[in-house]
Image (tube, helix red, strand yellow):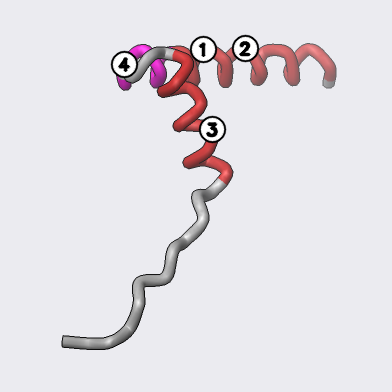
């Protein structure tokens, strides 16, 4: 057995965003995914209007 300690890797920005959606949807993974996609589509639509 090795004496090395596990190195904790901090969560990525994507991980933090996914966690925030998951918490907002009270642990419902599918609802969190749908909400994230709806927000992304809205952001893309708004970006398209500003160009």
Q: Mark 1 or mark 4: which comes first in sequence?
A: 4
Please state the extent of the stretch shown in magenta in the rendering: 29-34
38 sits to left or right of 25 = right
Secondary element at image label 2: helix
Q: Mark 3 or mark 1: which comes first in sequence?
A: 3
Q: Mark 4 or mark 2: which comes first in sequence?
A: 4
Relative to residue 12, is residue 23 depicted above or below? above
**Magenta residues, dominant SS class:** helix
> In x, y percent, where is residue 36?
49, 20
What separation in Å lies between label 2 and label 1 (alpha carbons)? 6 Å
- Mark 4, other Cα within 10 Å: few <14 / some 14–19 / many ≥20: few
- Mark 1, other Cα within 10 Å: few <14 / some 14–19 / many ≥20: few
> In x, y percent, where is residue 30?
31, 17
45 sits to left or right of 50 = left
What separation in Å lies between label 4 and label 2 (alpha carbons)? 21 Å
Residue marked by disc 1: 38
Secondary element at image label 1: helix
What separation in Å lies between label 2 and label 3 (alpha carbons)? 16 Å
- Mark 2, other Cα within 10 Å: few <14 / some 14–19 / many ≥20: few
- Tell me the residue at 65%/20% (across/down): 44
Residue marked by disc 2: 42
- On the image, which quarter does residue 22 sit in? top left
- Tell me the residue at 35%/72% (across/down): 6
**Looking at the image, which is closer to me, 41 or 19?**
19
3 sits to left or right of 51 = left
Task: For marks 4 and 2, give the one nearer the viewer.
Answer: 4
């Amino acid at each position: 057995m090795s004496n090395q300690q596990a190195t904790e890797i901090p969560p990525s920005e994507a991980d933090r965003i996914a966690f925030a959606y998951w918490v907002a949807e009270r642990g419902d993974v599918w609802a969190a995914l749908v909400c994230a996609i709806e927000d992304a589509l809205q952001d893309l639509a708004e970006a398209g209007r500003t160009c």
